[in-house]
Amino acid sequence: MSREDKVKSRSTVVSILAKDKEITALRTSQAHLAAILEIAHEAIISIDEHQRITLFNRGAEKIFGYTAAEATGQPLNILLPKRLSERHQNHVAHFSQSSDGARLMGERQEIIGRRKNGEEFPAEASISKHNVNETFIFTVVLRDITERRKAETEREKLIGELNTFGHTVSHNLKAPLQLILGYATLLDVQAKLPDSLQTYLHAILQNGRKMQNMIEELQVLAGVRKADVALKPLNMGRIVAEVQHRLTYMIAEHHAHIETTVDWPVALGHGPWVEEVWANYIINGIKYGGQPPRIRLGATDTCGGMVRFWVRDNGDGVAPDFQDQLFQPFARLNQVSAEGYGLGLSIVRQIVEKLGGEVSVESKGTPGQGSIFSFTLKRAAPNPDD
């Protein structure tokens, strides 16, 4: 064999080995793709330019009820309600002429699918197109959102029931309770009752005021869910001063010492709601602080254009295992000695999340080291009008 023939032979071997390597890589890639198609929970469906199904994965079989053998070669229309078939055909035809390589149909708006048994269901679908040898292939990825829609419907139902309950409480309980408190206050001021009866009267007044606070908290909670407010720059120093004035009696009764910062950053919010947040945090600091309660109020800039406002107390703190429950309705900081009904922190969470922020608590549950309750709001430009 001549030298030239040897070179050609060696070149042929190298070429064959390279081709073999490419084929092996291609087969591996195809195997990976097939595995992905099989384990995907979403329906993955490919159609040709005539809108006939060419690929129907295991997820599609589970969602629609057809086997791949039954669906392959059939028009896409078998997966759609008849009344919507023409519209979807037009969508795909228009998409084939567009310059977009992929789009989410309806921009994550629901589409309606139809199962083999005729049942219709809500879904989200994305569609992409690929040009293979001058022929378009379309791939649809579809997710059944039936369970999510059921959960959303149930949530809306529960919110509606809560709003109705708040309305009922407001109109059917508040007026009679005010009458009871009015007469009890009149007796307390004007009547000269024996000490034993005076004790009962004070119990009526004390528990009546607790119930009044609970009713007001329920009204606030229901109102926050329903109301939409415009966010404005807040004068936080003024709001904190208003809260301290509002809690003057409680602060004096518990001999609480409250220390505040001088320079408050300006954040966006709704003044009356943010006042409720501060009031609830400070009340908790007074109730569950040390003896006497020492409370610090402050603010810290955070990344992402948010401001973190916080309240630090000197109480026993909150056990880590209990912290996740604090902002749920009717949770109490101290199940034994808590006064009130635990709605305060739930209201705080509802308000802050409605304003685009988050609530949190930091505590080691160590007596004397206390807790830090905080909330975040979006930062605003200085010089607020409110």
Image (tube, rainbow, N blue to C red):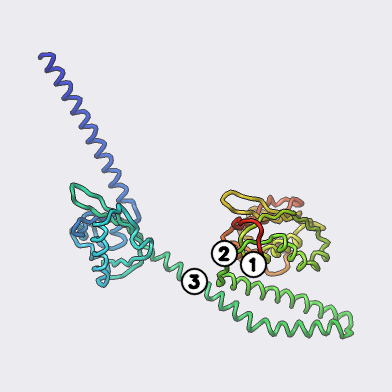
Q: Say if residue 10 shows up in the picture.
A: yes
**Mark nearer the viewer, 3 or 2:** 2
In the figure, 280 relative to 298: above or below?
below
**Looking at numbered disc 3 in the image, what kind of residue is underneath it?**
Glu
Measured in 3D between alpha carbons, the distance from the residue under mark 2 to the one under mark 1, in whole angstroms, is 10 Å
Circle 2 crowding by C-alpha within 10 Å: few under 14, some 14–19, many from 20: some
The residue that label 2 is drawn on is 354
Relative to 29, say whether 357 is above or below.
below
Q: Does the CB distance between marks 2 and 1 fall below 8 Å?
A: yes
Identify the image quadrant of residue 191.
Answer: bottom right
Instruction: State the quadrant of the N terminus.
Output: top left
Q: Is residue 316 visible?
A: no
What residue type is disc 2 on? Lys
User: Helix or strand or loop: what does disc 2 sit on?
Assistant: helix
Q: Label 1, label 3: how many angstroms apart (C-alpha)?
A: 23 Å
Q: Name the residue under label 3.
A: 156
